[in-house]
Amino acid sequence: MADIASAAGSLFEYFSPTKSPYYTIGIAASFALAYVSDVEGMGFWLTLAIPAYLVAALTFILSLKSINTLTPEEHAGQLRFARSTCISTAVLSLAYFGEKIAHPINRSVFIVNAVFCCAQIALFLTYNWAYNKQRLAEADRNYVQITLLTSAFLVDTSYNLSEYTKPHDPESFHHACAAAAMGLLWLCAAVFWVRKFVRLIHLEIRLPAAGPPDPLRGPDSNPIS
């Protein structure tokens, strides 16, 4: 029992809403949007779906603008865990929802889901590789909750895509709209991470120190080895 309590305490520490408050709101809003997509009637659905989506979008914006209150040690540890969570959720979404979508008539939807999931896997595997070579250069934001929101948006997109492809589902249009809306949020998150990675690569690029001039090639020569 002590080991279980210790493991639960460690898990709660990684996902502590007191340190990363926005991801819990974003996950709740994502779940709400997926849940209400089965409501019959356009008017009823929009009344429930629009507030949920606005909460998800505004939460993501706030998470991008929020400052980091974690210590460097806390942030590094939680970010490693969050990146692993992003990879895990992408793999599971690819397999679980891909299996539900897989059918010749759903080929285009299957490809969209696979591209989104594989892109997230590749993105965060690359991040793991990059940060294994170099410690986090800066922690001006709480990147933990941004990674968790990225995963929530992907899962919601994949779920709604799978529901959209259900045969004879009268509310498939609602799921299609929800998948497009959450997919847009996921794309915004992916662009954020790509820009962050480009900045990381840029910081890694260093011009070699200037050496003594080569007397045989003139004073301006400084070959780069």
Image (spheres, helix red, strand yellow):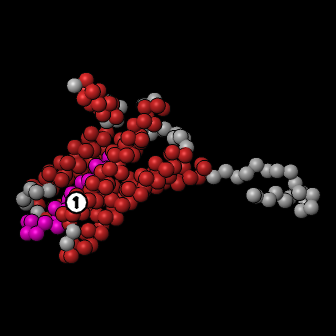
Most foreground residue, 102 or 79: 102
Q: Is residue 36 above or below residue 20?
A: below
- In the image, farthest residue toward the bottom: 104
Q: Is residue 99 above or below residue 206?
A: below
Quarter occupied by residue 111 = bottom left
- Is residue 21 in view? no
User: Residue drawn 70% across and 52% down?
Assistant: 207
Residue placed under numbered mark 1 in the picture: 97
Q: Is residue 113 magenta?
A: no
Range of magenta residues = 149-170
Give the number of callouts. 1
Please name the amino acid that badge 1 sits on: Phe
Q: Is residue 118 left or right of residue 3?
A: right
Quarter occupied by residue 97 = bottom left
Q: Position of residue 161 (x, y in %)?
A: 22, 62
Q: Is residue 223 above or below residue 87?
A: below
**Label 1 crowd (10 A; few <14 / some 14-19 / many >=20):** many
User: Which quadrant holds the N terminus?
Assistant: top left
Q: In the structure shown, which secondary structural element does the residue marked by tag 1 occupy?
A: helix
- Is residue 130 in view? yes
User: Residue drawn 53% across and 54% down?
Assistant: 198
User: Which quadrant holds the C terminus?
Assistant: bottom right
User: Residue drawn 51% across and 41% down?
Assistant: 136
Q: Position of residue 104 (x, y in %)?
A: 21, 76
Q: Position of residue 130 (x, y in %)?
A: 51, 49
